[in-house]
Image (tube, grey):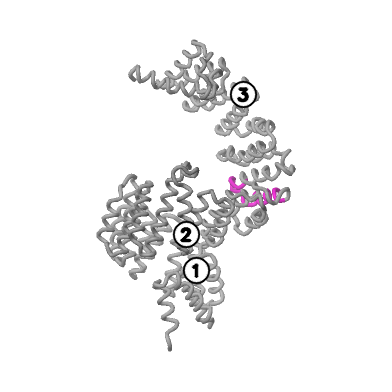
Amino acid sequence: MHATKLLASCLAGLSLALAQVPAAHAQEAEPIVNSDLSGELFYQLILAEMSANQGDLGNAYSLMLNAARKANDAKLFERSIALAIQGRSGDYALDAARTWLRAQPNSREANRYVLQILLGMNRVSDSLEPLKRELTEVSGDERLDAINRIPGYYARVTDKALGIAIVQQALSADLQDKRYGPAAWVTLGLMQLNAGDKEAPWASADAAQKLNPVSDELAVLALNLMELDDARAKSYLAAYWQSPQAKADLRMLYARRLTQSNQLDAALEQAILTTQQAPQQHEPWLLRGSLEWQMQNADSAQASLQQFLQLTEPGEPASRNALTPRQRSEAYLLLSQIAQSRKDYATALNYADQADAAEDAMRAGSRKALILAEQGKLPQAREALEAIPEERPEDARTKVSLLVSLLRDNGQVQQAYDVLKDAVQRYPQDAELLYDKALLADRLGKYDAMEHDLRRVIELNPQYHHAYNALGYSLAERNTRLGEARTLVQKALELAPNDPYIIDSMAWVEYRSGNLKAAQTWLEKAYSLRTDTEIAAHLGEVLWVQGQHERANQIWGEALQHNPNHSVLQETMRRLRKKP
């Protein structure tokens, strides 16, 4: 390296090491004072950084640690640890952290480094003392924060059972304490959950609930337990949501968990409550708008999304959030969809352009293509797709999926199928492309090809619940091999028990099997989770054939208001209402 460049590089590293040496703690507004850093120590730091830049990390570490001892400065100790980690020496990093702690026995930062390095080296049994020290030196809210940080420290240790035992020992004095106990039990519960234990976390939740049924910490654990048992976890949350201390951030997290499990009505209710509780927080407005649009309430969705954009305008506090550009893009794309649903294509394209400006070129380009295609401008739509830049290797594959969707949704099913046939040859291990090809084969009546592709998807990804569901539903729809259809849909339900479309498929298996009451029960559940038009068509049919014509007409009427041109709904109504 050229000498000038080397010196510049060394000084850049040195600026980090000297960021807060003892005599340089002055505020920006105060007069500049000379550091009492000696020339010898300054020269030693220069040598340390030069050694680091030349790749001699061992020498750099030794020089930096020696300088840290002489100056007794936290930043220099921290730099020593960084050099040891850069050199992949856990032992050196631990030695530097312990040297720092001996030099500054009251330093919580030094102790935390010792704890984290030990855990990073998987020396779990040695972590008890620094963990105890982390807890004993604080009280009040600081102690609660320290307890709540513990699961993160132990998240990656390999011996999770030992980690839990160490933490339980360190928290023994807190477990029965009214103030700290809920946090202590929740810490254990989260660690038990991370260890894959499906029973112990519930006992920890019970213990936390006895001490304080409305603690924030218990709510956090219950939200995490929703993945094990949704209904049981919600029982811990009921009292919390009624409490005036319920935090908007946790309610927002709850809304997201409900969204992930397709409980959209409940999710929207929580999102609305969050915007009422914290109207200046921007994220709840975005989630609310997204859910309102999914629930086909365009006016409310537009108002919520515009409120989100207003809160994240440049200069507003929310605009400083690092995620805001991506979130603003999401809002513009949703507003584009709303405008398109109203046939306001110019506004829809304008919103898509603004999403593009927010650095979401792939989704913005696909939005433009969909808008153009709906106007009958299919060649221009394909040009819009082709114009999307391929910035990552996976972008070419994404554009294939977008083209297939464009062709399929505009009646070019055979062309879409042909595109997928070529794509599957290029990406033979891509389960999603195979799945899409199978669905198109089903639409074209190529049932053998459909079944072959879906079984290949299951072979590639045994957890791909959509494939089990699609094959099971197809068999049920064609009223063939109903026993096999039931087995396939049951497997899909095991993998995604709250998916309304899979529940709808099980209802259809029961319907084809002549079990009308069971079919109705499944469909009522599916419709309660998602007021989807096709689910409404199926529920109406099952009600109709049982003589419940008035209720069937009511369900169909509601669905028609949201989606009057839905082919399955229209065909169902014509077939069943036809006079003998």
Whether residues under marks 3 and 1 lie with C-beta atoms below 8 angstroms apart, the answer is no
Report the residue marked by disc 2: 301
Which of the two labelled residues, at mark 2 and mark 1, occupies the earlier sequence position? 2
The residue at 48%/16% (across/down) is: 45
User: Quick check: 411 above or below 347?
Assistant: below
Give the percent coordinates (x, y) of residue 257.
55, 54
Circle 2 packing at 10 Å, graded few (<14), some (14-19), many (20+), is: many
- Give the distance between the C-alpha atoms of the residues marked 2 and 3, in whole angstroms: 55 Å
Say which of marks 2 and 3 sits in front: 2
Give the percent coordinates (x, y) of residue 89.
50, 26
User: Quick check: 257 above or below 539?
Assistant: above
- Give the distance between the C-alpha atoms of the residues marked 2 and 1, in whole angstroms: 27 Å
Report the residue marked by disc 3: 101
In the rendering, which numbered label is found on residue 504?
Answer: 1
Q: Amino acid at mark 2?
A: Ala
Give the residues drawn in magenta, as a range: 192-209
320 sits left or right of 253 in the view: left
Q: Amino acid at mark 3?
A: Leu
Circle 3 packing at 10 Å, graded few (<14), some (14-19), many (20+), is: many
The answer to whether residue 401 of the structure is visible from this angle is no
